[in-house]
Structures are given as C-alpha cells and as structure tokens.
Amino acid sequence: MARVVVIGAGVGGLAAAARLAAQGHRVTVHERAATHGGKLGEYRRDGFTFDTGPSLLTLPHVFTDLFAATGGPADLDLEPVDPACGYRFPDGTRLDLPFDAADVPAALDAALGAGSGAAWQAFHDRSARLWDLVGEPVLHRPLRTRDLARFSARLRDLRVVAPWWTLRRLGEHLLPDPRLRMWLDRYATYSGSDPRRTPSVLSVTPYVEQHFGAWWVRGGLRRLADALLDRCHELGVTVHLGSEVAGITTAAGRVCGVRLADGRAVPADVVVSDADARVLYEQLLPRSGVRVAATRSLARRSSASVAGFVLLLALEGEAGSGDGRPAHRVWFPADYDAEFDALFRRPAPVPDPTVYVHAPADAAMAPLGCESWFLLVNAPVHDPARGVDWDAPGLRERYADRVLEVLARRGEDVRGRIRWREVRTPADLERDAAAPGGAIYGSASHGPLAALLRPANRSPVPGLFLVGGSAHPGGGLPIVALSAKIVADLIGPA
Ligand SMILES: Cc1cc2nc3c(=O)[nH]c(=O)nc-3n(C[C@H](O)[C@H](O)[C@H](O)COP(=O)(O)OP(=O)(O)OC[C@H]3O[C@@H](n4cnc5c(N)ncnc54)[C@H](O)[C@@H]3O)c2cc1C
C-alpha cells in the first residue's frame, strides 16, 4: 500500500483518488479552494442554481465505469438532451440538431437544404473510423510512440488521421455548406483552440457528442462532483479543503511528499497532481534540471487555450422549453474568423462573439416562473502584461452589457427579464481554480500532432503523476476522468 497525496479536488483529482483508494492505497487529497469540484463549480442565490463551468456531459459511460470500479453505481439521474443543441446562423437559419444521430440527416436537409444531410453523414462515417483508430489508443492509455508510428505506417490510417490537415481544411474539403463548416469550426473551441491551427483529428469531437449522446445530470452537472466526493469519503479518502500545496518534495531524485502553504510537510510515496501542468512544473516542482526541461518543453508546445466570459442570469418569466426550444443554443457571428483573431492573434474581448446559452429544462435550477441562464462566450486569457486585463476597472460590466446587446441583436433580448446577473471573467477562473490566465483547457491543441502530445501522465520525476485537463488525454469531464484511469493503471494496485 502506497501513501498517495492528490493535489486538487477537481474531477481529475477526485476520480484518481477514488480509483487509487479502491486499489488499496491510502489516499489524501489537498484542495486549495474552500470547495471540491474545481472548474465543475456551482453558484446558488435566491433559489437560483447555476453550473458555473460544464453544462453538457458526453461519454457518460466513462463515469458509469468509474463508479462501478470504485464500489457501485452513483445516485445520479442522467437525461438525454434532445435536441442536443440549437444553432442560430447569421443568415437567420435555425438548426436544431436531434439527439439521435439517425435523425440528423433529415434535420439538416430541412434546415440547410437537400444534400446537407448526406454531406454530414459522410463526415460522420469518416469520424467513426477516426474514433476507432484514436479512441482506444489515445484516450485510454498513455500515448506511446508506437501508436503514433502505427498511424504513420498504415497509409489508410494516415489518410483518416490526416495530420497535414487542420480542422478548418477538413471542413472545407468535406462540408459544402458554409453553415456546416461553421458548426465544425466551433468544435475546435471544445479543446480551447483555433480551427485554423487545430489538427483535423479533433473532428472526432462532434462524432463523440452525436454517437454517445449529449447528457444532462438532474439538479445540475455539479451533482457529479458531489457524487465523486461522496465516493472518495466512502472509500476512506481524506479530503482537506482550503489546503494549498506550496511545493513537491523530493529525495534521492524521487517524490517523497508535499509541502503545504501553512508550512506543514506531508510525506507520500506517490503524488498525483490535478493542478495545471504549467503550475506543477513552473511553481510546485523543486528547482532542478527536470523542472527547467519540462518548463521549456511546455512553453515550446503551444499557446494557452481559450478562456471563457460567463454570465449567470437570473431571469423573470419562462420562455418555456416545453415549446421545443433547445436547452442549449449557439448564436454564430457574421465573421467567425474575427473571433479567432481576437482570441489568438490580437487578444481582445471579442467584439461580436459567438454566444452560447444553456437554459436548463430542470425545475431544480430556478424558482417557479423563473429561469437560470448560463451564458458563455469565448475569451482570451487574462494576461495584463501582454493581452487583456480582465480586472481593468469597468471592463467586466461593460463587456457583459455588450454581450447581452449582441444577443438581443441576434433576436434573443432578455435584458428586460434580468432580476440579477453575476459575471465571471477569465481572471475569476484563474483565482477560483488556479487555472493560469483562466485558460479552460491548459494549452491549445495547435500544430499537427498537438492533440496527441499533451503533457504526459507520468512525469520525469519518479513517483509524480499528472491527471486532469492540462495533461494527456485532455480537457472535458469524461476525458479528465479517463486521465484518472490512466494514472491509476500506471500506479497499479497496492
Ligand atoms: C466555463 C467552462 C465550461 C465548460 N464546459 C464544459 C462542458 O460543457 N462539458 C465538459 O465536459 N467540460 C466542460 N468544461 C471543462 C471541464 O470543466 C474541465 O475539463 C474539468 O472540469 C477539469 O477538471 P480537472 O480535474 O482537470 O481540473 P480543475 O477542475 O481545474 O481542478 C483542479 C483543482 O486543483 C486545485 N489546485 C490547483 N493548484 C493547487 C494547489 N497548489 N494546491 C491545492 N489544490 C490546487 C484547484 O483549486 C482545482 O480545484 C468547461 C469548463 C469551463 C471553465
């Protein structure tokens, strides 16, 4: 039995803690925030409840497997989201994508014109082959050079992975309708990236969402974090909240524990870090050649992923999702590239952003006759020295007004219904979740193999492992939970 310290009680940290405890290890979690869950946060006020981070769950079986492997099913109520999402295009087209993939071609033909369904189906079928190729080897275990070599060696595989193509280029090649290309471009932002630089392998993302479905957890996605915490407690994991790790301690070249911000030393045989990989390598690891090399390699690898500007809107009255209005809606701008330029090339709050709204069809989330809306636009990271200072006086409220005005211009004016609003900037996420710049996914996936080459789960320091969205295989709730499985498998049973 090893003494394991987990740094951070995000989904990755809690999932790793539960798995390692179930494998017989003695596990302690230290979380700097006053609550668990990390980016899977929640805000409650006056009978309104908001998920402040994730609003959609994909690959739900990853969590079913996690709970089954750690003691049995969790008490979670999962619901399919149907329609999966409503897209509103700048030319006024409305497309509601059904939950069931079999219904998608007809919905596309009806909304975008004959032939769109067939183009999407060909794209979807191609993505299915891609998923067969990369799903298992990339998401379920540490990436091995021999997997990459295999993709390159077999011409058929190489054509599907197409490392020479960006997501944008793939869309241009396969999707004749510009609105479908816009829809595909958006998936680059699911890994915090620019479609013009994201490798086309990330075209598996819409496939995964459509094939395995889009899901909601009754009462809010935050219930998932609660269930993970409960599972940790049941397995005897000790979770210390408000307990920041200030550094990792090593002896004879391997990990021997952590040092807390209050000065206490906690001995450990194994340390699993759910902190952002940059924080781990630049701040928590003792100064050494390993730290210098790891920091350099991270800096070389990529730019920061996008951050998010979030509005939580407590709304009077109900537009009613019973009328078929999708709970998840996206309004695209006329010039999508201007948004990516503002996010990645000339950082600025996006003047005319894509707006995403989640208005949960769940009575638990708002008082009777009201709605709780989560509104998200992509934003450049908080970087006062070289980019946007999201703490600049007046910016948060000014930009919130702007986003609501944009939404009104696109046909959804809720300004007269707002009882109160809560604004969350990238600077807030940086403070709340220790995410550098408020980047949602650590680093962006830019460059031919970037999506496959995130920081490894096994660090160069023996006994130190990385879990969570900034490490392999990447961000998003199920993917982070898979990183916990990879780490638990690497460490092995007690
Ligand atoms: C606005 C937004 C919307 C999103 N939407 C979706 C979505 O719809 N679907 C989806 O699947 N995913 C979504 N995501 C992504 C998803 O939330 C993340 O990928 C996932 O929650 C990350 O979990 P994690 O365990 O990697 O890290 P985190 O949640 O970042 O947890 C890391 C934890 O480590 C703690 N920590 C850091 N440093 C220290 C230290 N030194 N000492 C102690 N503790 C420390 C932090 O406080 C934090 O609690 C969204 C994220 C955001 C922000």
Image (cartoon, rainbow, N blue to C red):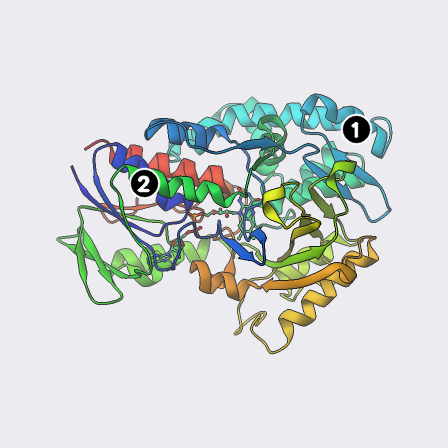
Question: Toward the viewer: 105 or 395?
Answer: 395
- Number of other residues with Cα within 10 Å of mark 1, as a class: few under 14, some 14 to 19, many 20 or more: some
Question: Toward the viewer: 444 or 330?
Answer: 330
Question: Toward the viewer: 469 or 397?
Answer: 397
Instruction: Specify the quadrant that holds the C terminus.
Output: top left
Rendering quarter of residue 164: top right
Of pointers 2 and 1, the one earlier in the residue sequence: 1
As drawn, 142 above or below 431? above
Q: How far across and down, in percent of the image, does residue 212 sit? A: 57, 27
What secondary structure is found at the residue carrying circle 1? helix
Q: Residue furthest bottom?
A: 393
Q: What residue is at 21 percent from the left and 38 percent from the top?
A: 25
Residue of label 1: 107
Residue of label 2: 232
Instruction: Specify the quadrant that holds the N terminus.
Output: top left
Three-letter residue code for mark 1 = Ala
Number of marks in picture: 2
What is the CA distance from the residue labelled 2 to the residue labelled 1?
43 Å
Rendering quarter of residue 376: bottom right
What secondary structure is found at the residue carrying circle 2? helix
Q: Does the residue tagged 2 have its C-beta within 8 Å of any atom of ligand 1? A: no
Q: What residue is at 63 percent from the left and 29 percent from the top?
A: 210
Q: What residue is at 24 percent from the left and 40 percent from the top?
A: 236
Kindly identify which numbered label has been placed on residue 473: none
As drawn, 370 above or below 328? below
